[in-house]
Image (tube, grey):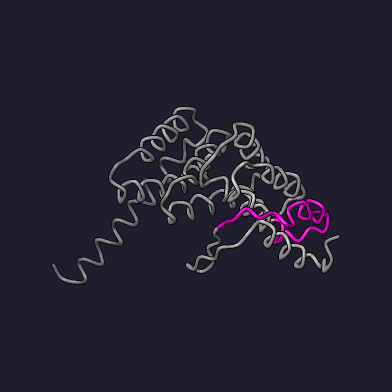
Amino acid sequence: MALTDELQRIFDADRALRKAEADLLRKKRSASLVALLRSETRNALSLGDRAEATMRLERLADLCAQVPGPEMTDALIAILNDGEPRVRVAAGEALRDVGFERYAEVARGIERALERGDEGLAMSELPWVLAEIAEPSALPLIRRFLDHPNADVIAAAIEALSQLGEPDAALDLKRFVGDERTVIIEDFEEETKTTLGELAEDALRMLGYAEHD
């Protein structure tokens, strides 16, 4: 097959994809579509073929973000719990985009995750989503992650508070100064071992607090 023909196939497939998505989303307020996306999300998360699961979950994250309702927020949080970094990036960006347009849906979904006592990777990602959206209720919601039993979740919340830049977070951070629980922080594909106390001190400095007593 000539290169021009191969390129044309890509254009045709792209056009067909956009049309199929538009046709599907014309029914975005349909209960049957919500049920379908929830079911397909569960199925994709349980697939043994990780390449297929990654492809489906990335696409599902985009679709779920375009369909309003609490079920879709819960589905995005479930996708955010996947072990594949590409999938978590897609779900995190989708939640952020929904949060800019329909913040209450995302906030309530995060509240439900906290009330359920969810564990897993999503709980370390959600504080960042809140900090990026930076709505007024972000601070009290991120605070709730500081009471999570998992030190990695607390570390994410501390860093998110630093990014949020709210001076009112200082008292929340001071309670972790001296906390010797160790965590691994990933930064540009590098891993650094540190403690919650050191993270809290760094966050306080970012907020302009040189003294912590």
Relative depth, front residue between 29 and 154: 154
- Residue 96 rendering spot, x and y as whole percentages: 59, 52
| Quarter placement of the C terminus | bottom right
Q: Is residue 58 above or below residue 113?
A: below
Which residue corresponds to the image point at 73% horizontal and 57% vertical from the top-left?
A: 178
| Quarter placement of the N terminus | bottom left
In the current view of this chain or complex, which residue is farthest to the bottom?
Answer: 3
- Residue 17 rendering spot, x and y as whole percentages: 35, 51
Which residue corresponds to the image point at 49% horizontal and 68% vertical from the top-left?
A: 190
Q: State which region is magenta.
A: 161-183
Which residue corresponds to the image point at 41% horizontal and 48% vertical from the top-left?
A: 59
Locate residue 180 relative to residue 33 in the image: left or right.
Answer: right
Give the quarter of the image for residue 205. bottom right
Magenta stretch encompasses residue 208: no
- Residue 123 rendering spot, x and y as whole percentages: 57, 45
Relative depth, front residue between 63 and 186: 186
Give the quarter of the image for residue 196. bottom right
Q: Is residue 94 above or below residue 67?
A: below
Locate residue 49 relative to residue 156 in the image: left or right.
Answer: left
Give the quarter of the image for residue 194. bottom right
Which residue corresponds to the image point at 38% horizontal and 36% vertical from the top-left?
A: 40
Counting labels gives: 0
Relative depth, front residue between 185 and 43: 185
- Residue 155 rendering spot, x and y as whole percentages: 63, 54
Locate residue 187 relative to residue 139 in the image: left or right.
Answer: left
Magenta stretch encompasses residue 181: yes
In the current view of this chain or complex, which residue is farthest to the right?
Answer: 213
